[in-house]
Image (cartoon, helix red, strand yellow):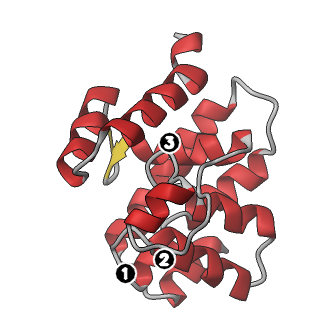
Amino acid sequence: MIIDILKEENCHKWVIDHSVAVCKKATKLSKNFDVDLELIKQGSLLHDIGRSRTNKIEHGIIGSKIAIDHGFDEKIAKIIERHVGAGISKEEAKLLGLPENDYIPITLEEKIVAHSDNLLNGSDEVDLDFTINKWKSKMDNYQIPVERIKKLHKELVLQFE
């Protein structure tokens, strides 16, 4: 069971609680799309496994490697790697000191997990304004991630309200 793996990796209780909440939100968002629900559930439960090693922005990259080490599919690893914010471009990765790679979610499953994570603060659901303000406080040049988050929100949420 995935929760056991999170515990084995020494994830804090708040990470596990948050991951369960992201899974619930992602499952709810998924109902509007033809997606691999099992992939979304596994990816959302594992999305923050890298926080067992760091709470910095590279937790997605680290978590991807941890998932592979546990035998999870590359599709799960990509969900984990690309979940931060609404993704990180190759240029942004370089500026942030991350390996130069494109970490922007591509598949619908990747997008759903990333945005479900955006819409939670811990285990509490938050609105888009809260998420935008949170990213503005974290980033010097917040315009790029904010626009990407708004685009994901429009694609995954607004069209169904």
User: What percent of the width, then of the height, locates residue 118?
Assistant: 41, 43
Residue that mark 3 sits on: 116
Residue that mark 1 sits on: 54
User: What percent of the width, then of the height, locates residue 107?
Assistant: 74, 44
Q: In the visual, does 131 lie left or right of 85?
A: left
Amino acid bearing label 2: Gly
Q: CA distance from mark 1 to mark 3?
A: 21 Å
Amino acid bearing label 1: Thr
- Residue 24 visible: yes
User: What percent of the width, then of the height, locates residue 54?
Assistant: 37, 81
Residue reaching furthest to the left: 137
Query: Residue at position x 52%, y 50% from top?
Result: 87
Which element type, helix, strand or loop, lies under badge 1?
loop
Contact (CB < 8 A) between labels 3 and 2?
no
Q: CA distance from mark 2 to mark 1?
A: 6 Å
How many numbered badges does the structure rendering display? 3
Q: In the visual, does 77 lie left or right of 74?
A: left
Q: Nearer the viewer, residue 99 or 8?
A: 99
Which element type, helix, strand or loop, lies under badge 3?
helix
